[in-house]
Image: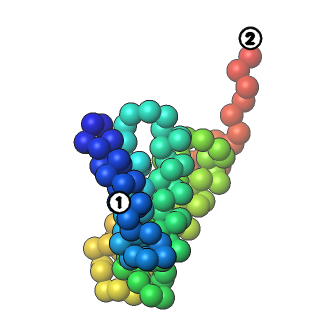
Amino acid sequence: AVNLSTAIACYEAALRVYTEADFPMQWARTQNNLGTAYSDLPAGDRAENLSKAIACCEAALRVRTEAGFPLQWAGTQINLGTAYSELPAGDRAENLSKAIACYEASERGFEAAGDHEGAREARRGLDLCAQLLQNLRREGPEEPSGG
């Protein structure tokens, strides 16, 4: 946790130099890395950390477009999918559906870039989330506990 907290501080410091306007690729890479660090951070509020990870990935995707940078775009999409799949806040089915969309996009991007291992990793995340969503729908809404 200490190393990740240090990494987060370093990435945030780098973003004061690598602005989106002046250094878009470095800025997007740093946003992606910052998102990964927040996603992996075990300390603090898990929902808050994952919400920050999502915001960082979404910011990176402003530069890392599918058309311009398919491999980087796919990598950021897989990170975004992971964050959504683990997000404990909000509607679980909606979070899983967003994760599935990210994994589908990631798989497409990796395939387009010829990265078959990346595509397989995205497919594993997609399959897991699809199974979790199916189980969630099968179980139905949770019943309030009685007294």
Relative to 83, 7 lies left or right: left
Residue closer to the observer: 64 or 80 = 64
| Labelled disc at residue 147 | 2
What's the colour scheme?
Answer: rainbow
Place of residue 90 in the rendered image (x, y in percent of width and height, measured from the top left): 65, 44
Indicate the quadrant containing the C terminus: top left, top right, bottom left or bottom right.
top right
Place of residue 101 in the rendered image (x, y in percent of width and height, measured from the top left): 56, 68
Q: Is residue 114 above or below residue 141?
A: below
- Quadrant housing residue 125: bottom left
Residue closer to the observer: 33 or 26 = 26
Q: Is the residue marked by circle 1 packed among few (<14), some (14-19), or many (20+) residues within 10 Å?
A: some
> Please, what secondary structure does the residue beneath circle 1 have?
helix
Place of residue 112 in the rendered image (x, y in percent of width and height, measured from the top left): 39, 87
- Single out the residue that lies furthest toward the top: 147
| Labelled disc at residue 31 | none
Q: Is residue 69 above or below residue 84?
A: below
Looking at numbered disc 2 in the image, what kind of residue is underneath it?
Gly
Which sits earlier in the primary sequence, circle 2 or circle 1? 1
* Residue 134 visible from this viewpoint: no
Residue closer to the observer: 125 or 49 = 49
Q: Is residue 119 above or below residue 54?
A: below
Q: Is the residue marked by circle 2 packed among few (<14), some (14-19), or many (20+) residues within 10 Å?
A: few
- State the CA–CA distance, disc 2 to disc 1: 53 Å
Q: Residue at x 33, y 41 (%)?
A: 5
> Please, what secondary structure does the residue beneath circle 2 have?
loop
Q: Residue at x 48, y 43 (%)?
A: 49
Residue bearing mark 1? 14
- Count of labels shown? 2
Q: Is residue 144 above or below residue 53?
A: above
Q: Residue at x 29, y 44 (%)?
A: 6
